[in-house]
Image: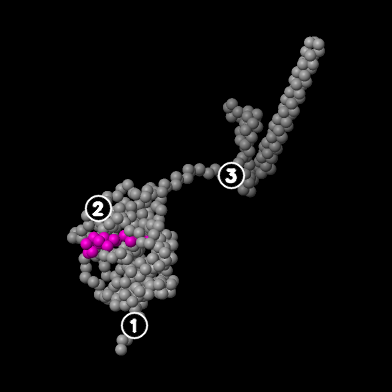
Amino acid sequence: MTRLMLGRTLERICKGVLLLCLLHFLIMMILYFDVYSQRFDLFSRFNNGRNGSRNNGSGAAGSGHHYYYYNLSRPNVTLASYLATGEQLVPSARPETNHTPSPKPLPPCPEIPPGLVGRLLIEFSSQMTMERVQKENPNVTMGGRYTPPDCRPRWKVAIIIPFRHRDNHLKYWLHYLHPILRRQRIDYGIYIINQLGEDTFNRAKLLNVGYTEALKDAEYDCFIFSDVDLIPMDDRNLYHCYDQPRHFAIAMDKFGFRLPYAGYFGGVSGLSKKQFLKINGFPNEYWGWGGEDDDIYNRITLNGMKVSRPDVRIGRYRMIKHERDKHNEPNPQRFNKIQNTKNTMKRDGISSLTYRLVQVKRFPLYTNISVEIGKPPPRPFKG
């Protein structure tokens, strides 16, 4: 019985060995035919190359054809090694290219930039020139553009200033604001919207023009609207857009560093492109001083948004003292217009803006856009 069991066991072992041998033989045959096919393919390419060179002969250069010579006599190299690598025998039709590593994507700019100073000393007694301001800001490019070199800002900001006959104020504004904006890591461009002629000034309409013209220059998604005579006293008052429309100048020196009233939205404000379009931009019919900022505040609240503001200790501003401009007298119709914002805001705004573009000129520190915006309509005669 024991011998019978032993015999069966040996028989099974022999069968297993035989199966393994058969499997090994099949694998070897597959590999052999695979290598044979590769060699046949390579030799056919090799012979075609040599035949091509023979056929071309000395006329190859004249005909523009190329032939290839394969050096198989290098030290420590055999035909088998060429056949093993395969590609070395076959000339590549692809041109050699220098693979330069792609630059690393910039990280997002920090929400609180590390180089901020905080409270600033603002004074207007020293003489200011454009040459001095330009030397102070060598990294600002033509047209008043700047982009942080080491990070990627969240917003692309157009700073828009309504303007007429304020050249001296502009020098101080650029002197202080360019360094502040660079420390804040803002990607920005500065646009001076110059109202030509001596007709009544229209601040809000110029701001609409600035929005329209800035978008022709770059794909801005944030707009800061600033008077040229207001300088921030703290660089932590960050000039970019927020979830809600932003009022920056909440504590001016002329108001005793207090908000004059709850609905005040004047001086310096900011809206994203989406927020600006939601309120149909700014009104075009406020000719003369006053009222347009209150109309803008009404547009914001009537469209379900709220005004956001910085801390009162950060939102402090100094105003450059000056006499009231000629042809910018208080608008006697402003109070009546403010009460009718709900009825007028859909038809009076960016959708109804008309003006004539006269000139766009780029300076080292800003872009000047000169426009004609028309005249106020004649006032109704009161009998």
The residues colored magenta run 245-259
Residue 94 badge: 3
Task: Report whether residue 283 is seen.
Answer: yes
Sequence-first tag of 1 and 3: 3
Question: Which kind of residue does numbered mark 1 sit on?
Answer: Pro
Q: Is residue 42 left or right of residue 264?
A: right
Disc 2 target residue: 119
Q: CA distance from mark 3 to mark 2?
A: 62 Å
Q: Could you say which is closer to the camera, residue 287 or residue 275?
A: 275
The amino acid type, in three-letter code, at marker 2 is Arg
* Residue at the image point whose x is 74% and y is 23% from the top: 20
Alpha-carbon neighbours of circle 3 within 10 Å: few (<14), some, or many (≥20)? Answer: few
For disc 1, the marked residue is 378
Could you tell me the amino acid type at mark 3?
Arg
Residue 188's tag is none
Q: CA distance from mark 1 to mark 2?
A: 47 Å
Mark 2 neighbour class, 10 Å CA radius: few under 14, some 14 to 19, many 20 or more: some
Q: Give the quarter of the figure containing the N terminus.
A: top right
Classify residue 210 by image quadrant: bottom left
Locate residue 295, reporting x and y percent. Answer: 35, 70
Other residues around mark 1 within 10 Å, as few (<14) / some (14–19) / many (≥20):
few
Magenta span includes 164: no
Q: Is residue 288 above or below residue 11?
A: below
Q: Secondary structure at mark 3?
A: loop
**Residue depicted at 72% across the width and 28% down the height:** 27
- For the point 26% across and 75% down, which residue is it? 329
Which x, y percent locates residue 140? 33, 55
Q: Is residue 67 left or right of residue 377?
A: right
Q: How did the renderer colour the structure?
A: one colour
